[in-house]
Amino acid sequence: MTTQNPGLFIAFEGGDGAGKSTQTAELAGALEARGFKVLRTREPGGTPIGEKLRSLVLDHGHGHIDAHTEALIFAASRAAHASQVIRPALEQGQIVLTDRYIDSSVAYQGAGRDLGTDAVREINEWATSGLQPDLTVLLDVDPAVGRRRRTAGDAAEDRLESEADEFHARIRAAFLDLAAARPEKYLVLPAHLPVEAISARILERVASLLALSGSVPA
Ligand code: TYD
């Protein structure tokens, strides 16, 4: 379906607490029920080396990590993920749903950490040999709402989540800018809508992509 592969590649993006993992699971279930083979994965992580890098970069207790090192760890994790997991699944014709991809680095490290969105995009395009999603679902969340959601039940915040609301506001603006620059590749939904309303909109958009490719759901 993609211009590059027989499969379909969908990324879920958004601030912390936007509900990405819920929506990724919902879409995977709906597609599997229609007979599609779906691979659900996430970043940072998705491979053994990626999971190690995930804990290095997210857990507290590794001392100070400067912004460039942080960006390169996310890019290294993504390089492994793209070549070992995502590309092979797409080549087999699977639908790949990833919880976060390059846009997360552009928003968090490029805008949030102020490394520059172009520089961060470039290292990530190099790291993934240019593998781009067919569609990015952006769940747009107000940073204060996101923080309330993720700390409900006393869940501890990781290194990035525990940054100030101002950091998260820069990230939100960067995600919206990315979507505005290429609207045909994005579906932007307000994260405060009911879960079912969001999943219905996502399924509708994905079904139309699949119909375009001739892979009509069973
Ligand atoms: P995520 O796995 O979505 O958080 P959780 O599962 O704990 O809710 O992402 C972990 C954190 O890493 C999140 O704060 C966003 C951040 N992140 C980046 O800063 N850059 C990146 O490239 C990625 C993939 C994540």
Image: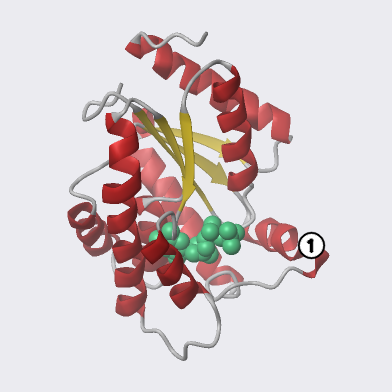
Secondary element type, mark 1 = helix
**Looking at the image, what colour scheme do you see?**
secondary structure
Q: Any atom of ligand 1 within 8 Å of the CB at mark 1?
A: no
Please give the count of numbered marks on the rendered protein.
Answer: 1
Residue 49 position (above or below residue 186): below
Q: Residue 192 appears at what percent x and percent y? A: 70, 42
Residue 60 sits in quarter: bottom right
Q: Residue at x 25, y 28 (%)?
A: 5
Judging by the rendered image, the residue that carries numbered circle 1 is 152
Q: Is residue 109 left or right of residue 129?
A: right
Residue 28 position (above or below residue 178): above
The three-letter code of the residue at mark 1 reads Ala
**Can the viewer see residue 12 in this picture?**
no
Residue positioned most to the bottom: 63
Residue 201 position (above or below residue 130): above
Q: Residue at x 69, y 27 (%)?
A: 197
Q: Residue at x 30, y 49 (%)?
A: 84
Residue 127 sits in quarter: bottom left
Q: Nearer the viewer, residue 209 or 214?
A: 214
Q: Nearer the viewer, residue 50 or 182?
A: 50
Q: Residue at x 71, y 29 (%)?
A: 196
**Can the viewer see residue 167 in this picture?**
yes
Question: Within 10 Å of the Cα at label 1, are there few (<14), some (14-19), or many (20+) other Cα atoms?
Answer: few
Q: Residue 149 appears at what percent x and percent y? A: 73, 57
Q: Residue 103 appears at what percent x and percent y? A: 38, 51
Q: Is residue 26 left or right of residue 172?
A: right
Q: Nearer the viewer, residue 106 or 77?
A: 77
Residue 92 position (above or below residue 45): above
